[in-house]
Image (spheres, rainbow, N blue to C red):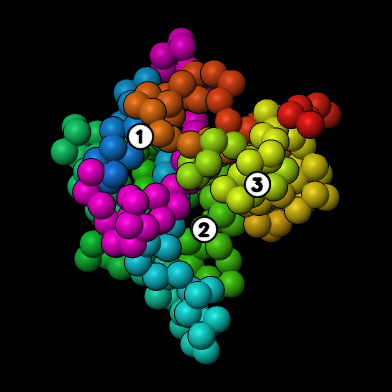
Amino acid sequence: MSAEARYQRVLIKLSGEMLGGTAGGGIDLDTLNRMAGEIASVRNLGVETAVIIGGGNIFRGIAGAAVGMDRASADAMGMLATIINGLALQDALERLGCYTRVMSALQMNQVCEPYIRRRALRHMEKGRAVILAGGTGNPYFSTDTAAALRGAEIHADVIVKATKVDGVYDKDPMKFPDAVRFERLTYMDVLGRGLKVMDATAVSLCMDNELPIVVCKLDEPGRLARVVCGDPIGTLVTTGSESAGR
């Protein structure tokens, strides 16, 4: 492992919408390749790397349920969408020379491996990036919750959540120009204020396991590697008592 890296094992959470690029839907190949380059740069530091990917660019279960679909069926469709994204990301990573495995919580042996915790750990120890698709394998749980669960299971040092904004704000910065960004928050700050970091189940899981979360925007080349090296980018959510930015 590089001496420059602050974290030895990271879990990166990518939303499906990010892969959709400016259109927000489908898979934008330029965006896909850029995200793959960011992930490969972390792996090239010698950091053990896992990725949880969403499926919102293809189908969101909660959106299907909102228009009358059975929630369990809609969530199953959303989980399948994450596998499509995972396979696309695997292809992009391997074109960069980054050996990768897609592991799914849903059984789909023809295209990816089943998620087995010890096997995932072994892949990372061998220097492979591991893409964890299929969410938790259960309806009613978001990919944020899947990230917190898998992060705890693999003993990740940090979850890096890549979003379209450069951190956590006290209100929506897209709507309110006076929104204030936090540099540091506690889990209880997030839960108590209802801040949009991850859903409450995911934040609670991270709190119970003292798993830090960094929320950042990947709008510059090399930014993900800088986060992993400890640069103060975005918002850090930990057990610490300090919360800045107010």
Question: In the rendered image, which quarter is residue 180 located in?
Answer: top right
Q: Which mark is residue 39?
A: 1
Disc with the residue nearer the chain's start (2 vs 3) = 2
How far is mark 3 from mark 1, CA to CA?
32 Å
Identify residue type, mark 2.
Answer: Thr
Q: Which mark is residue 212?
A: none
Disc with the residue nearer the chain's start (2 vs 1) = 1
Q: Nearer the viewer, residue 136 or 217?
A: 217
Residue 226: x, y in percent? 46, 21
Identify residue type, mark 1.
Answer: Ile
Question: Which of the image's four quarters has the N terminus?
Answer: top left
Residue 91: x, y in percent? 20, 47
| Disc 3: CA contacts within 10 A as few (<14), some (14-19) or many (>=20) | few
Q: Which mark is residue 176?
A: 3
Question: In the rendered image, which quarter is residue 47 located in?
Answer: top left
Q: Nearer the viewer, residue 74 or 196?
A: 196
**Residue 24 located within the stretch drawn in magenta:** yes
Query: Which of the two marks, 2 or 3, is nearer to us in this view?
Result: 3
Please name the residue shown 23% across and 62% down the image: 111
* Relative side of 144 to 200, left or right: left
Disc with the residue nearer the chain's start (3 vs 1) = 1
Q: Nearer the viewer, residue 166 or 214?
A: 166
Residue 234: x, y in percent? 58, 31
The magenta stretch is 1-30
Q: Are marks 2 and 3 in contact (CB under 8 Å)?
A: no
Please name the residue shown 83% across and 29% down the image: 241
